[in-house]
Amino acid sequence: MSAADSHTEQVEALYSHHHGWLRNWLRRKLGCHDQAADLAHDTFLKLLSARDILPGVHEPRAFLTTMARRLLIDRARHQQIEQAYLAELALIADDLPVAPSPEAVLMAVQALRQFADALAALPAKAGEAFILHYFHEKTQPEIAAEFGISVRMVQKYLAQALLHCHAALADERH
């Protein structure tokens, strides 16, 4: 049996034993059966792509709730970005000669999601430094003081974030 087959069987076993429980747990958290079902599904999809972590799982329910919570956080971040974009678009809509088409809005939202995914994949400090610098317009010395690190380390975080985002967005185009 190949490693891929073994991994798939492990995910299938987790799914058959814990999917209903996870879906019900999420339904209590979210208050919506459909969203809970979607998130439970997304959790197991993510598990299928995470080949190296299952052998070390000793508490499957704790593991699944941790994964589901992380997906909830990612979903909330995506919604925040989308809402911020739509709010900004509404503010400038009166100044635009022509309102953007629904397709243009969808493309912009998808690009923002790709960007948010790229930032979410970074180490926390690198992503936070990037957001503080480029969106909140904080200087590198201000970020260094806030994090309690050197300006040089802030520069490394920013370079890491820029390179990672560039590579992630380039991968999406290909």
Image (cartoon, helix red, strand yellow):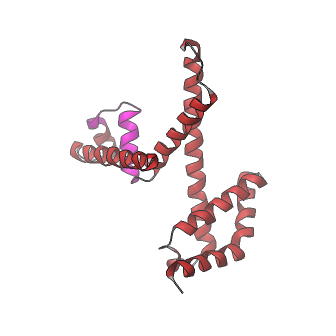
Toward the bottom, the furthest residue is 1
Over which residues does the magenta segment extend?
A: 123-142
Q: Residue at x 61, y 53 (%)?
A: 72
* Majority SS type along the magenta span: helix
Residue at x-position 21% and y-position 45%: 152
128 on left or right of 117: left
Where does residue 31 sit, x and y in percent of width and height? Answer: 76, 51
Q: Residue at x 56, y 24 (%)?
A: 89
Q: Position of residue 151 (x, y in %)?
A: 23, 42
Image quarter where the N terminus lies is: bottom right
Residue positioned most to the right: 33
Q: How many marks overall?
A: 0
Q: Residue, x 57% and y 51% (percent of image)? A: 73
Closer to us: 21 or 106: 106
Report which quarter residue 22 is drawn in: bottom right
Q: Is residue 37 magenta?
A: no
| Residue 142 vertical placement versus 65 (above, below) | above
Q: Nearer the viewer, residue 123 or 162?
A: 162
Position in image of residue 7 (x %, y %) = 55, 77
Q: Is residue 32 shown left or right of residue 97?
A: right
Residue 57 x %, y %: 54, 77
Give whichever of 140, 14 is nearer the camera. Answer: 14
The verdict on residue 126 being magenta is yes
Up/down of 159 relative to 38, above or below = above
Compared with 46, 84 (above or below) is: above
